[in-house]
Image: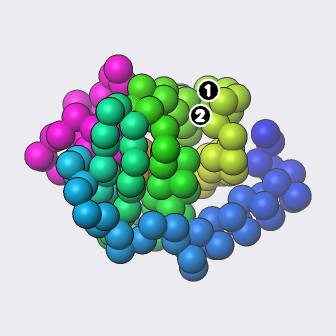
C-alpha cells in the first residue's frame, strides 16, 4: 500500500474518522473479563484500557475505554473487531504483523482490513498513537499490572509469543 496516493489516503482518513465517530466495543467491560491492560501515550495524552474475556485460549469478549486522538481511538476500535473470536496465539501474531507494518516498515500482508492503518506512517508522530492499543493488547494478554507507556522502550517493544 502506498499511502501517498490520493485514493488510499482518502480511504485511510475515512476509516479513521468512521471508527473514531462510531467506535466498536467502546465503553464495554463485558461480564467475566479476565484480562485487562492499560496503555498511555504521554505525548498525545492518549489512554486506552482493554478488557478481554479469554476462555479455552480464545478471545470470547472484548471491550475498551479511553480517550485520545482519532488515530488512537480508531486503532483501538479496529483492534476489538480484529481480535474478537481469535485464539490468543492468533492475536499475538496479528500484533506482530501490525507492529512490523507500523513501526518497522514491514509488509502489510496478513493484516486484512487493518492495512488501512499503514496510512498513519505519513504522519510519523501518529505511529505511537496507532500502536498504543496493540501494545495494550499484549499487556492484557500477559496480565501486566503496569501501564504500558509509549515512552518506555523496554515495555514498548515486547517480544510476542
Name the residue: 30% across, 49% down: 53
Q: Nearer the viewer, residue 100 or 50?
A: 50
Q: How many marks?
A: 2
* Left or right, residue 140 beside residue 127: left
Q: Can residue 49 be seen at all in this image of the molecule?
A: no
Q: Nearer the viewer, residue 17 or 64?
A: 64
Considering only vertical position in the picture, is 145 above or below 108? below
Name the residue: 52% across, 71% down: 23
Considering only vertical position in the picture, is 142 above or below 5? above
* Left or right, residue 45 beside residue 125: left
Whether residues under marks 2 and 1 lie with C-beta atoms below 8 angstroms apart, the answer is yes
Name the residue: 69% across, 47% down: 113
Q: Position of residue 133 (x, y in %)?
A: 40, 52
Name the residue: 38% across, 54% down: 61
Q: Can residue 133 be seen at all in this image of the molecule?
A: yes
* Left or right, residue 50 beside residue 108: left
Q: Which residues are magenta?
A: 135-161
Tell me the tag on residue 101.
Answer: 2
Residues packed near mark 2 inside 10 Å, few (<14), some (14 to 19) or many (20 plus):
many
Q: Position of residue 51 (x, y in %)?
A: 29, 56
Q: Mark 1 highlights which residue?
A: 106
Amino acid at each position: 500500500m502506498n499511502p501517498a496516493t490520493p485514493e488510499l489516503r482518502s480511504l485511510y482518513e475515512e476509516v479513521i474518522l468512521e471508527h473514531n465517530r462510531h467506535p466498536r466495543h467502546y465503553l464495554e467491560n463485558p461480564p467475566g473479563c479476565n484480562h485487562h491492560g492499560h496503555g498511555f501515550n504521554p505525548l498525545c495524552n492518549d489512554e486506552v484500557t482493554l478488557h478481554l474475556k479469554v476462555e479455552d485460549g480464545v478471545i470470547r469478549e472484548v471491550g475498551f475505554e479511553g480517550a485520545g486522538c482519532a488515530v488512537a481511538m480508531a486503532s483501538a476500535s479496529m483492534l476489538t473487531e480484529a481480535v474478537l473470536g481469535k485464539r490468543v496465539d492468533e492475536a499475538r501474531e496479528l500484533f506482530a504483523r501490525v507492529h512490523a507494518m507500523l513501526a518497522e516498515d514491514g509488509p502489510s500482508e496478513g493484516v486484512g482490513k487493518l492495512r488501512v492503518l499503514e496510512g498513519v506512517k505519513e504522519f510519523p508522530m501518529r505511529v505511537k498513537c496507532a500502536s498504543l492499543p496493540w501494545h495494550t493488547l499484549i499487556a492484557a494478554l500477559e496480565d501486566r499490572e503496569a501501564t504500558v507507556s509509549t515512552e518506555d522502550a523496554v515495555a514498548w517493544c515486547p517480544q510476542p509469543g
